[in-house]
């Protein structure tokens, strides 16, 4: 745990030795089940994570947690107020919790998340849980990094299901209707179910012999009581078993590798361009000033810095 913490710090600080260590660890990664937990701010993701951790510890599983908060400037241990919900597990040697915050101008949060997941996989964690706000179009593509994406929805937001960002249906492998102690949980559940059904009937009928499709189950939960946690865990395990049974896990792993690789590449290209900018063009502010004054055009500058 100490070595992993140190490596994560070195990765954060961008030490060249960290890259060498990550490369050495790479053959030992790829064995965990990566579960994404995503949804609107305050939906109860951390509370659910806390309950899932307790449930899985009861089953003897070892767990890693990456809590991603794009709005916070602080990275590090489980220190943020929000993470206190998982604090009781902080002394459990079989649970490793890491908070990740904004990566600054480089926008490398996705890359940092992928690296943290890899380190936890190399530690031998059986399940790695990634908690993050929002889905899909965010800086952190949790859907692209996970084997199972749990989308947390809460009732009582008016036309809640309609208000859920487009694309959520596509990335959700499991829906948790959390805060089911509140009014409207059944309605939200019904709306989600009809959305899923609508999608099925509007899709072209699968050709005979086509591989079976996964339909996201909907589980009502109350993280605070707790209620529905075993059911949520079962739904997650069923989806993971589905991937294995249908040979989809390899597909998913290829997609995960693609996401992580693109994140790394994007950060590399951007940092190269920014280093060039600092070196050859003076400070970004000056360049921006020249562009604003129409003394330089941004396309020519971008082409010069990024190639093409
Ligand atoms: N009534 C009720 N409250 C809940 C439930 N689950 C979580 N909460 C409360 O909702 C608030 C937010 O919970 P969090 O677990 O921090 O939510 P989150 O999605 O992790 O929040 P962010 O990380 O800030 O986006 C807390 O006050 C929780 O106690 C639930 O099932 N029912
Ligand atoms: Mg949280």
Image (cartoon, rainbow, N blue to C red):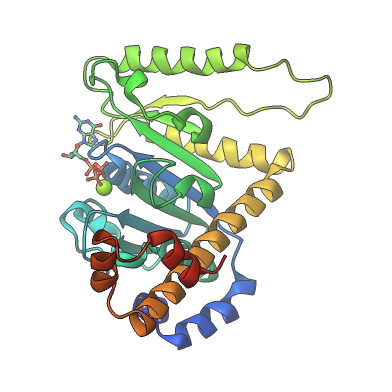
Image-based side of 85 in relation to 233, left or right = left
Where is residue 276 shown, x and y percent of the image? 41, 79
The one nearer the camera, 296 or 135, is 296
Outermost residue on the bottom side: it is 17
The residue located at (39%, 30%) in the rendering is 176
Q: Quadrant of the rendered structure where residue 28 is?
A: bottom right
The answer to whether residue 271 is above or below residue 78 is below
Quadrant assignment, res 208: top right
Residue 133 vs 262, above or below: the answer is above
Looking at the image, which residue is at 23% across and 19% down? Answer: 156
Q: Position of residue 56 (x, y in %)?
A: 44, 49
Point 48% across, 41% down: residue: 149
- Locate the C terminus by quadrant: bottom right
- In this view, the residue farthest toward the left is 81
Q: Is residue 265 visible?
A: yes
Left or right relative to 73: residue 149: right
Figure quadrant of residue 75? bottom left
* Residue 202: % across, % down: 61, 13
């Amino acid at each position: 745990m100490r070595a992993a913490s140190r490596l994560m710090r070195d990765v954060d600080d961008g030490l060249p030795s960290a890259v060498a260590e990550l490369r050495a660890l790479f053959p030992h990664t790829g064995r965990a089940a990566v579960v994404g937990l995503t949804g609107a701010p305050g939906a109860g993701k951390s509370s659910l994570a806390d309950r899932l951790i307790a449930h899985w510890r009861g089953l003897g599983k070892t767990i890693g947690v990456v809590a991603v908060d794009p709005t916070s400037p602080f990275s590090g241990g489980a220190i943020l107020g929000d993470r206190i919900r998982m604090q009781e597990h902080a002394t459990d040697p079989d649970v490793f919790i890491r908070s990740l915050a904004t990566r600054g101008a480089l926008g490398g949060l996705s890359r940092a998340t992928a690296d943290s997941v890899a380190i936890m996989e190399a530690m031998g964690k059986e399940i790695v849980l990634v908690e993050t706000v929002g889905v899909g179009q965010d800086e952190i593509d949790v859907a692209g990094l996970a084997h199972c994406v749990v989308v947390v929805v809460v009732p009582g937001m008016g036309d809640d299901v309609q208000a859920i960002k487009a694309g959520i249906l596509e990335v959700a492998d499991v829906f948790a209707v959390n805060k089911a102690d509140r009014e409207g949980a059944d309605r939200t559940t019904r709306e989600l179910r009809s959305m899923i059904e609508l999608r099925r009937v509007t899709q072209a009928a699968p050709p005979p012999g086509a591989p079976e499709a996964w339909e996201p189950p909907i589980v009502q939960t109350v993280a605070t009581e707790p209620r529905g946690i075993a059911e949520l865990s079962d739904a997650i395990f069923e989806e993971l078993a589905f991937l294995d049974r249908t040979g989809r896990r390899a597909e998913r792993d290829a997609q995960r590798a693609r996401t992580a690789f693109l994140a790394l590449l994007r950060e590399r290209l951007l940092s190269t361009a920014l280093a060039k900018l600092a070196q050859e063009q003076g400070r970004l502010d000056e360049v921006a000033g020249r562009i604003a004054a129409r003394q330089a055009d941004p396309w020519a500058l971008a082409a010069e810095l990024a190639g093409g």
